[in-house]
Each structure stands twice: as structure tokens, then as C-alpha cells.
Image (cartoon, grey):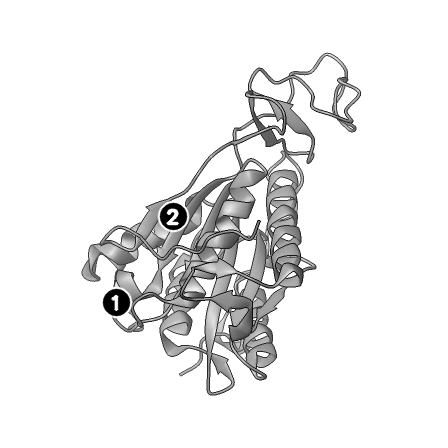
Amino acid sequence: MAPALSSATPPDGLAAGGMTAAVEGDDTPARLDHHGTERGAAGTAGPGSTGGPPSGEPPGQPPFDPGPVRVLGLGGSTRPGSASFALVRAALAMAAAVGAETRAADVGRLDLPLLEEGRAVADYPPAVGRLLAEARAADALLLCSPTYLGTLSGAMKNLLDFFSLLAGDDPPYLGGRPVGLLAFGGANAAHTLTALGHVAHALDALVVPTSVVVPGAAVDRARGAIVDPKIERRLRRMAAEVVDLGGRLRRPGARMAAPLPPRSAGDGDRIG
């Protein structure tokens, strides 16, 4: 059955999603662990697992288990009932179905001001600080933009511009975390996907292999459902990749051991 689309979210634009999903034919909550293995609530291995220690973990060592992978979905538009934000919620539901803990940020409800160079985070409305806190807490992200004049929307670009305030973090920006990309629109939506990819790379994110262009005909706005089975399958594949890679990369030693060199204006990211 095609997942229902919902654009409901609290007034601050940040909403929590589901954390666990039931294994088919069982009432025990299950999730994918950091190796992509399905595990029950008590930590028992799921179907297809040998039950032994994961590959690469020394025998006798306790398994690395920091809890569910945290996925933050960002998207939407200033239009009420945004279809692009509904797609974010649908993709997050798919991530939750494979064990992720999800959060959603609606660009239309966040009501962010324009980013101003040199302005401190404390001088912005509280929504900016909450957004940055959610980004720091996330193991992986989903980004979705509608297509405006052949590229991503100004509101979505402004939201992503605020992540430049993460430059002083260690690691900076999104620090090598995986990102899934979605673009909603017509024939030019592929350009939107490309633009999102450029921004994700500038923020030191890792774009997962599957990206999704969602045409308007794939969404039944009246019923609030994805009606194209191919789009639904691609969304599920992308969500699974984001959760799996997000879990793998948070393991100790999984990311780059050497610190990244600091960026400067000469790198071309923020010149003006």
C-alpha cells in the first residue's frame, strides 16, 4: 500500500517521528542495528543473522549499540499543505520502518529570517538554534525541495545556508554524515536534485547512491498518497541507504581519523 502523506507538524516547524517498527509476523519491536542487521528489543539477532559478533568486532567485546539511527528530514515550501514536505514525512516514515528515530523540519513553518553574515546564533529567533541543534544530533539527513524556476527554492536554500554556522564544529558542517536527496516537480526537477547535491557536498555530507525525483503525477494530493509504485520503491531504497550508512558511519573509527584542514574564503563556499 502506498504510504499516506501528511504535512501536519507543530507550530515551531520541528516534529518527531516514529522510532521502531514491528517485525512482520511478530509483536517485538525491531530495528536495523549499525550493521544493517535486524535486531529485536532485547538485542537478539533477527532473520538471516548468525547471532554472533558482527564482522570487525573482537570476540568478547560488547557490541556497539548507541540506539536508533537519528534521521532529520528537511523540506517543504511556504505553501500551505506543501507536497514536498509531505514527501519528507513519507520518506521519514520509511526510515522509521527500518528502525530510525526521525525528526522533521518544515521550512514553511520554521519562518526563518535571511542568513546575515557575522550575526551570532543568539541574535536570531529561537527556531535557528533549534534547527542547528537538530542537525548536530542527527546521524543522517533527508533533504527535499520543490522545483522553482529550474532549481531549489529560495526558502530551502536559505535553510541550508544556516548550516554554514556549523563551520566551527568538529567535524565542521555536516561532518561526513549521509544525506538522501529528493526533488519535487516537473521536467526541471533533475536540476533541483543537482543543486541539492552541490550544497550537500559543500557541507561535507555524503550523498547516498539513490536520489529521487518525484513528479507531480506521482502524488495524489486529494487522497494524500504516493500513487507511483516505482517512486515508492525508490523512496524506500533511499531511506534504507540513509539509515544503514548513518549507522555504519557513527561506529568508532568509521570516519576520517585525521582532522580536516580548515576552510577559508578561497575555497569558494562563502565569498561576498
Percent x, y of residue 146:
46, 73
Q: Amino acid at mark 2?
A: Glu
Q: Which mark is residue 96?
A: none
Image quadrant assignment for residue 196: bottom right
Q: Secondary structure at mark 1?
A: loop
- Of residues 104 and 28, the one nearer the viewer is 28
Residue at (31% x, 71% y) in the render: 78
- Of residues 4 and 135, the one nearer the viewer is 4
Left or right side of 236 for 170: left
Within 10 Å of the Cα at label 1, are there few (<14), some (14-19), or many (20+) other Cα atoms? few
Q: Amino acid at mark 1?
A: Arg
Vertical placement of residue 106 versus 96, above or below: below
Percent x, y of residue 189:
56, 78
Q: Which mark is residue 134?
A: 2
Residue at (59% x, 66% y) in the render: 201
Furthest residue toward top = 60
Specify which label sits upstream in the sequence, 2 or 1: 1
Residue at (65% x, 57% y) in the render: 208
Vertical placement of residue 122 versus 151, above or below: above
Counting labels gives: 2
Percent x, y of residue 25:
63, 25
- Of residues 207 and 219, the one nearer the viewer is 219
Residue at (48% x, 75% y) in the render: 265
Left or right side of 104 for 51: right
Q: Are marks 2 and 1 in contact (CB under 8 Å)?
A: no
What whole-number distance in Å separates the C-alpha atoms at marks 2 and 1?
20 Å
Q: Which residue does the numbered mark 1 point to in the structure image? A: 119
Q: Is residue 207 visible?
A: no
Percent x, y of residue 127:
25, 56
- Of residues 171 and 201, the one nearer the viewer is 201
